[in-house]
Image (tube, grey):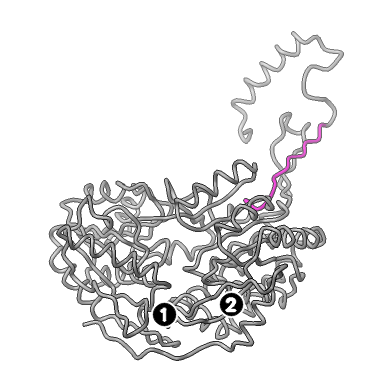
Amino acid sequence: MTTFAARSAGGVDSAFLEELAGRVQAADPDSRLEVLNAMTGRLLGDVPRCSAADVAAAAQRARAVQPAWAARPVAERAAMLRRFHDLVLQRQDEVLDLIQLENGKARRHAFEEIMDVAMVSRYYANTAADYLKPVRRHGAQLALTQVWELHHPKGLVGVISPWNYPLTLGISDALPAIVAGNAVLTKPDQQTPFAALWAVRLLEEAGMPAGLVQVVTGSGAELGTPIIEQSDFLMFTGSTAVGRNVAAQAGKALIDCSMELGGKNALLVLDDADIGKAVSGAIRACFSNTGQLCISIERIYVPAALWEEFTTRFAAAAKAMKLSAALDYSAQMGSLISEKQLKKVTEHVDDAVSKGATVLAGGRARPELGPFFYEPTILSDVHDGMEVFADETFGPLVSLYRVDSEAEAIEKANDSPYGLNFSVWTSDPKRGRRVAAQLKAGTVNVNDAYAAAWGSVDAPMGGMKASGIGRRHGEHGILKYTEPQTIAVERVLPMGAPDWLNPGRYARIMTAVLRALRHLPGVK
């Protein structure tokens, strides 16, 4: 049976929250938004309710600071990120409580956000200079044409982030934009504004100019369009439905955007998998962050030969998980963030059960722990026509499906409009890679739930199909925040026939040259 701890009465100093909220500049300071403690449902603090005019003013302030920041050498900007990296690790206890209270997650999952911000900071501090330096390109007339590719900052990058990872998504996407020389206009979700405000405070302590990153607080419905209108590039993380509207508005404004959107992620247990390892991995894949994870697993495909053992052991492991609101590392799973999320999980379970699904574990809210707690839940006998079959739940809920072959598992995993993160479990890494290459998802983890691909910051991360456009991390994660420029310098002879040469003769000479270049090694 799932075990439970007593509700924690822990909190964060109100003066600390007031100081963070005071970093948001709004014309009407008396118009406020309440932020709830997800563990208790009671008031945690409040922040200004910004308006479109506040967004415009924030953009103006950020743009005023940006040129001087962009003029600094990349090495200086990278050094600031290294100091920020150190401060995040040194001061993590300040924000861990804050993340837990804003979001409701277990502390072990809050710490994943600390690791992510540190790794992203270190990576771009160490690689920005190489990514941003001028690059020589092959010229049209080989040695006669000298070509350089430059990368200039976009200017003002807008970031709209969700509530599920308030520190990671609230600041990590901004870090490569900052080191690339941009200013940032960021809007954390109104339910979880404090972790992002804390991060900006630390960035300024690390040496980032005050005002370079502007935080506005409020609802996406009210501030999303003004942010798009004020930005030169937009980074958005959220639902696919909202992402479609954001992309349309960005297109109308003729600004580029990058978006990580929804998913209905699948885990494939292959017939040679170590069941113990697969069960442990599935627990992490499905119930980390209480399932409120864009790359969380909501579908598991199990071969018939392993069905009984896997389902029995997986259900037992889920039932044994410790749920708690404690502000320490004792809990294996925390709370959902809100009544809205609790309602959605409950509706998906109730709808499925009413149509014939079987509950193998969980299936109940736990109000004695906190108002938004729900047990880790496993369903079987799920079929088309149930809400949970194809729709993203975004909670601690997973459906198991029996398959008769590897090919069937691949086919069913790919039978979704989404393609964000998949997981494959096998005792043969080569087989795992072969299967992974056939899955239509932006990231696939072999013998890991999600962290291996996400944490490998040198590689791109993002979704296929309706799960997003663009990528974070790696080269793309920083160059998307720049404007590439090509500078070509001709020497000796211009392109085209010179005045002293008959155009027909020039055409014959160039035809022979082009034929020769076709076979010359090293010529692109």
Position of residue 37 in the picture relative to residue 477 (left or right): left
Q: Secondary structure at mark 1?
A: loop
Q: Residues within 10 Å of mark 1 (few under 14, many from 20)?
A: many
Q: Which residue is mark 1?
A: 106
What's under tag 1, amino acid-wise? Ala
> Is 476 rendered above or below residue 524?
below
**Of discs 1 and 2, which sits in the foreground?**
2
Position of residue 235 in the picture relative to residue 60 (left or right): left
User: What secondary structure do most residues of the magenta stretch adopt?
Assistant: strand
Percent across and percent down for residue 16 are 63, 85
Q: Which residue is mark 2?
A: 46
> Is 432 rendered above or below residue 515?
below
Res. 53 in view: yes
Percent across and percent down for residue 104 are 43, 77
Q: Which residues are magenta?
A: 480-490
Q: Residue 249 bears which disc, if any?
A: none
- Quarter location, residue 29: bottom right
Q: Quadrant of the C terminus?
A: top right
Counting the numbered discs, the total is: 2
Res. 181 in view: no
- Quarter location, residue 294: bottom left
Position of residue 488 in the picture relative to residue 33 (left or right): right
